[in-house]
Image: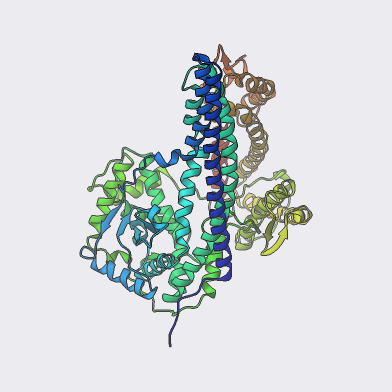
């Protein structure tokens, strides 16, 4: 019985049509603007000749040049992307051939045959945790059936099985078969045009305004900028329409490539590697981040480091190892995310993982037998290639490579630099704080409860449900206040119009109030339990720690809000601001600085945080509070004053966060030490 590959869906076809139309509209508008600029050159050139014919002379000649320059500058603005030199150097890629890697190419050719596409022209190994298809020439791909290249990340091969790698290759070859990929070539050209005309134009504008040095030509340069800004606004508006439609098409392309992969392989391996992808990427990025932050430590083999971190992260998140790889369940996707509001990002190129999995489970499949052997076994000299890629990554990132570096030492150093922040108690306090307003009332009478009841999974789930509700309410309030940002959203899977957001908020606030009350009652039972577990001398210590933490919590919000509000008035000093605009921004800053200084003085002298300041920090804060800084004078910043201000704000944030977190840990460690096994 003949089996055909999955056909593209009606949604795919519709979005392909819209993408083609939007690309066509963009190039039509772009060509119209070019023609308009050429007409400008002709008309202004004619005007220039008329000026010279009326009265020949230096002034007339300069005016004539100025008139012509307007059209020329606008034309160059539109076409300068063509002359932009680009170097596509594959410095981080290793090309492999069938002679070098016959086992890998056997799998590639097998999957290519199954998906009915031509094998790739070239195959590269890259450092990352991904796979992709690409063209050698994006330009020629718009007009000719150019063979595509395949790039496979070593970070991916290092973290999947052979069967899972086949599902990924089938997905990529599913893209090979999509003729709509050619649209990407046109969009790529649009991106170049937009980048050079809309986002990379500052130097050109400065040249147009200041290049000549003559006041008369500067005048004509200013007129040129007016036309350039108008054209840029038009291109930006049309490009937004194009990119939004293309992003929508790209999401459908991903669903179709998934359908091809499901059909020629099986959904189980496809889903397992998809669920593991974030963990694998976190381990890879964690490795690179560690070495970037610790440049004194040489990198031996980043892929052994990746494997070690993946195991470490799996232990922290209770992911079991099956067939030498971590198994991530679909429930883990939303274990800590209980938000129910869904807003589709119209600019996203990939669908959400949960939606991809739901579609994969609906796809037709041959359901081929799984292959649980590690994918690295397909690569001859895998360790040597990993070492060579490590050396490349080190060279690109200016890091040191040393093959003799010990793996156990890497893990020890990583744990030392990035210690695991766990508070125990079944995760109850990971995203929740032990705040009780009246600790004395909580311990007044003994309550007969068991510790397992206090930290059971249902109570932990309530914590994340509370966090999810708080997030949903924030999002709904934003949608209520900004009804034109998006048209629709989903709540708990059901579609709503943005105009309905405000009506949902009271119901969610009522539910949030209920859950907050339940958790508060549980917190009081927790304190009651440990208070009566404690020896007499430790009871008052426990109550005292809860009292202080409650004060720290209240003061945290007050100071944090003051910092957040005042920081907005400092932003002009973090970006390029014209000399003419700085005094206006400074006046606004100084107007709001007085109440901020009062808050800082209270924070330093009277808050519960005052004991946690170092003497050096106290001196900086006192100097600032007593100062009359003006920050800017004689057309320049007074750097010492600016540095002091930023030091105060930054250290304020550091003291808040560190003190709060450290004292929370101290309280919970003390509380944990009171537990007695019955």
Outermost residue on the front side: it is 53
Q: Between 81 and 632, which is closer to the camera in this rendering?
A: 81
Q: Between 166 and 50, which is closer to the camera in this rendering?
A: 50
The quadrant in which residue 116 appears is bottom left
Q: Between 34 and 14, which is closer to the camera in this rendering?
A: 34
In this rendering, does residue 646 appear at all?
no
Q: Where is residue 337 in the image (x, y as percent from the top left)?
A: 59, 57
Residue plotted at (43% across, 53% down): 282
Q: Position of residue 302 (x, y in %)?
A: 32, 51
Q: Where is residue 559 in the image (x, y as percent from the top left)?
A: 65, 32
Residue plotted at (58% across, 70% down): 10
Would residue 436 be found to the left or right of residue 216 on screen? right
Residue plotted at (54% across, 37% down): 39
- Of the 4 image quadrants, the one containing the C terminus is bottom right
Residue plotted at (35% across, 58% down): 151
Outermost residue on the top side: it is 634
Q: Between 653 and 368, which is closer to the camera in this rendering?
A: 368
């Amino acid at each position: 019985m003949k089996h055909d590959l999955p056909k593209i869906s009606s949604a795919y076809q519709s979005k392909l049509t819209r993408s083609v139309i939007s690309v066509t509209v963009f190039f039509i508008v772009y060509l119209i603007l070019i023609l308009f600029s050429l007409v400008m050159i002709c008309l202004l050139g004619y005007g220039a000749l008329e000026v010279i014919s009326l009265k020949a002379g230096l002034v007339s000649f300069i005016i004539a040049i100025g008139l012509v320059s307007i059209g020329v500058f606008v034309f160059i603005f539109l076409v300068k992307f063509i002359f932009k030199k680009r170097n596509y150097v594959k410095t981080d890629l290793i090309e492999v051939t069938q002679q070098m890697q016959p086992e890998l190419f056997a799998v590639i050719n097998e999957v290519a045959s199954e998906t009915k596409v031509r094998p790739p022209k070239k195959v590269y190994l890259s450092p990352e945790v991904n796979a992709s298809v690409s063209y050698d020439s994006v330009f020629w791909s718009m007009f000719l059936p150019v063979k595509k290249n395949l790039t496979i990340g070593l970070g991916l091969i290092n973290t999947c099985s052979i069967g899972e790698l086949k599902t990924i290759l089938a997905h990529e070859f599913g893209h090979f078969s999509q003729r709509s990929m050619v649209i990407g070539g046109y969009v790529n050209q649009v991106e170049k045009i937009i980048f050079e005309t809309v986002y990379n134009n500052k130097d050109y504008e400065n040249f147009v305004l200041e290049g000549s040095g003559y006041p008369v030509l500067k005048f004509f340069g200013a007129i040129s900028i007016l036309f350039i800004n108008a054209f840029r606004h038009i291109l930006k508006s049309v490009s937004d329409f194009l990119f939004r439609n293309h992003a929508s098409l790209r999401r459908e392309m991903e669903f179709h490539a998934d359908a091809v992969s499901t059909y020629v392989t099986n959904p189980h391996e496809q889903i397992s590697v998809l669920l593991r992808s974030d963990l694998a990427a976190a381990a890879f990025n964690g490795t690179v981040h560690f070495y970037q932050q610790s440049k004194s430590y040489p990198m031996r083999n980043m892929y052994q480091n990746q494997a070690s971190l993946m195991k470490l992260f799996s232990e922290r998140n209770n992911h079991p190892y099956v067939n030498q790889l971590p198994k991530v369940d679909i429930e883990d996707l939303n274990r800590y995310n209980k938000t129910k509001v869904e807003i589709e990002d119209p600019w996203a190129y990939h669908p959400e993982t949960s939606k991809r999995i739901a579609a994969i489970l609906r796809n037709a499949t041959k359901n081929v037998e799984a292959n649980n052997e590690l994918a690295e076994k397909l690569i001859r000299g895998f360790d040597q290639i990993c070492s060579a890629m490590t050396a490349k990554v080190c060279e690109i990132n200016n890091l040191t490579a040393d093959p003799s570096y010990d793996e156990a030492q890497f893990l020890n150093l990583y744990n030392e630099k990035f210690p695991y922040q766990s508070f125990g108690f079944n995760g109850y306090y990971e995203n929740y704080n032990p705040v009780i307003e009246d600790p004395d009332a909580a311990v007044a009478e003994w309550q007969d409860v068991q510790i397992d009841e206090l930290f059971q999974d249902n109570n932990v789930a309530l914590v994340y449900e509370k966090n999810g509700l708080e997030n949903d309410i924030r999002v709904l309030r934003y949608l209520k206040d900004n009804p034109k940002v998006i048209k629709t959203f989903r709540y708990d899977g059901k579609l709503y119009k943005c105009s309905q957001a405000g009506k949902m908020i009271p119901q969610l606030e009522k539910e949030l109030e209920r859950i907050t009350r339940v958790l508060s009652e549980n917190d009081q039972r927790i304190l009651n339990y440990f208070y009566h577990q404690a020896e007499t001398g430790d009871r008052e210590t426990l109550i005292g720690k809860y009292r202080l933490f409650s004060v720290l919590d209240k003061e945290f919000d007050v100071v944090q809000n003051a910092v957040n509000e005042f920081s907005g008035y400092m932003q002009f000093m973090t970006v390029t601001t014209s000399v003419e605009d700085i005094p206006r921004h400074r006046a606004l800053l100084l107007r709001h600085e007085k109440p901020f200084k009062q808050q800082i003085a209270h924070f330093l002298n009277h808050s519960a945080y005052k004991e946690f300041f170092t003497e050096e920090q106290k001196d900086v804060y006192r100097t600032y509070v007593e100062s009359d800084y003006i920050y800017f004078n004689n057309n320049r910043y007074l750097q010492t004053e600016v540095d002091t201000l930023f030091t105060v704000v930054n250290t304020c944030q550091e003291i808040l966060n560190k003190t709060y977190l450290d004292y929370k840990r101290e309280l919970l460690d003390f509380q944990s030490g009171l537990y007695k096994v019955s």
